Image (tube, coloured by chain):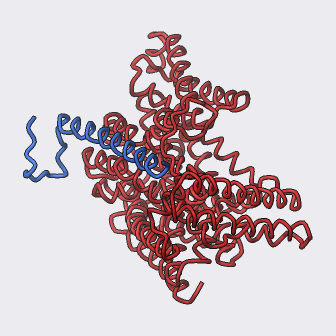
Chain colours: A red, B blue
Amino acid sequence: MKLLDWVIVVGYLAYVIWDGIRMTKNSGNVEGYFLANRSLPWWAVGLSVMATQLSAITLVGTTGQAYTDGMRFIQFYYGLPLAMVILCITVVPFFYRAKVYTAYEYLENRFDAKTRSLTSFFFLISRGLGVGVIIAAPSVILSIVLGWSEVVTIFVIGLSTTFYTMVGGVQAVTWTDVKQMTIIFFGLFVVLFVIVSQFPPHVSLTDGLYLAGSLGKLQTVNTSFDLTEKYTIWSGLIAALFLFLSYFGCDQSQVQRFLTSKSVSEGRTSLLMSAFFKIPMQFMILLVGVLVFVFYQFVMPPMLFNTVEADKIPPSAQYSALQSDFQRAHEVRKEAALAFVGSRTETTREAYVSADKGFNDARKNAIDFVKTSTGNSSFNDVNYVFPTFVVENMPMGVIGLIIAAIFAAAMSSISAELNALATATTIDFYRRHFQKEATDKHYVRFGRIATFFWGIFACIVAMYATNIGSLIEVVNKFGSFFYGSLLGVFVLAIVVKRARARGAFFGLLFGIASVWIASSYTNIEFLWFNVVGCLVTVAAGYLISLTVTDKEIISSNA
Amino acid sequence: MKIDPDKKIDPSVELPDAWWHRVYIGVIIATILVITALWAFSQHFSS
């Protein structure tokens, strides 16, 4: 990194904190601090919805995934537009007109305080841990790229975001999200342009796409019905649909975005904006990863992108032999790639595919060697591909811009999550159970304290998450347990008239248990857990509700 | 209900359901077109 890059990164951090802090106008009352007085325009809310979902690990991980696995991941988003349409018809008008602060508040109106508290509690636990992981993942990568310690990167990302979120509330979150999305888009366009400009003179973008396509890296539709296959058009259109319905419709970090809109129409428009732009945006991010792959057909890539793990390996004859094999395999593949670009025949294509297989085998041998020699059986350097590529190959200024974009992606998600955690803590627990009658100033002060608490909590979780790899898996799994079942509770609330509080409460517990059983005793991919959780919660909730007599309802109301 | 495209819409006023139904159908058609375009893109460069 050169001076200009540091100026861009530090300038970005200083600007975003200053910008967030100055958004304190109209945030002195509860509605202003948590919902921006329901005054935000649809385009700002729409960008905030997209920014919240696009975390740094999405940006960095997706490009790395495209480098190794191609564009298959895009199928995950095929169900998103349909989910947005369903949400626009159902929950957006429901929540908006109910004048609630949190999604769970609505459940008390429909069922009881117990169901509200349980769902809000699950949200706090899963999101509280989740935001720690959202901080940890880019912190580890940036610490390697920038040469800082992990603790420093964790606290730079975590505390700076906590600070402006705490002071400015939801307005700071939304307006900084807008600017952060602008930086991310701009950074992606620049990097796309620069990568293509760095291809060899006789290799065009089209040639590069043919190279990637010949290896199956441009596959965007897989019609396999195999439930153990992670990304197919069916898992995207059906299983991910349930996940998106739950995430955008029942997760406070997203619900709070559209509750800040000026009207139901503006809330709907903000979600539909995401429906229109999410797939093309994800395509662009994946395309960056694919083009990085093409770039490395002609330039020697690092054998291991995670340089910290690579440096831990002591020099040995076996490791040197692996490096030689890797270099040889790269040269063979480079020649085959150039031959394929020169004449796209079946013969040159087969030779290129075979050379790529040889290259992949050489890299796999190196990774296996790292796993054995370091004892780290979960070693995976996919998330390091893009940052390493940027730092080693991008020109001065562009490096700073991309690092700022990674910071922006991380901070935009973290701020929304912290704000949502503070809202649920204040509205669903503090105001509901502990301090029912207090001034707006008091609740806003408590909201700021809650934001600070969750920020510190997330930083502490992040420090552990960097050392315990399995924690990330635990958090992701916990999220999957929760999402489908939570969606089931909202389906019971909005769609099933016969549903009662007891059914919703125990239906949720049954749903979570069913997902646990599915994850323990079957091999189905995690996306399908959302379908299982939702269906079991609805079925169990409905059946249990049938056991509630009208007499019981009258006596509980009395 | 007939929609006049030149008529300015006040954002604080709720739009009618009929208008939204057309928008939803438009979103679904656009999604089908996008998925088809992506499929065509991958087929083109894989052949």
Pick the quarter of the image with the C terminus of chain A: top left
A457, above or below A234, in the image: below
- Identify which residue, A433 or A536, lies in the foreground: A536
Q: Residue A414, percent across and down?
A: 53, 60
- Identify which residue, B46 or A517, lies in the foreground: B46
- Identify which residue, A371 or A552, lies in the foreground: A371
Seen at 40% across and 59% down, the residue is: A33
Asked whether the viewer can see residue A362, the reply is: yes
Q: Residue A210, percent across and down?
A: 49, 57
Q: Residue A248, percent across and down?
A: 44, 44
Q: Residue A453, percent across and down?
A: 60, 60
- Identify which residue, A183 or A236, lies in the foreground: A236
Q: Residue furthest bottom?
A: A3
Q: Would you say A418 lies left or right of A84 here?
A: right
Q: Would you say A39 lies left or right of A220 here?
A: left
Seen at 45% across and 31% down, the residue is: A490
A17, above or below A218, in the image: below
Q: Place residue A30 in its image quadrant.
A: bottom left
Q: Would you say A359 lies left or right of A259 here?
A: right
Q: Place residue A174 in its image quadrant.
A: bottom left
A188, above or below B13, in the image: below
Asked whether the viewer can see residue A485, the reply is: no
| Number of numbered tags placed on the structure image | 0
Pick the quarter of the image with the N terminus of chain A: bottom right
Seen at 41% across and 32% down, the residue is: A109
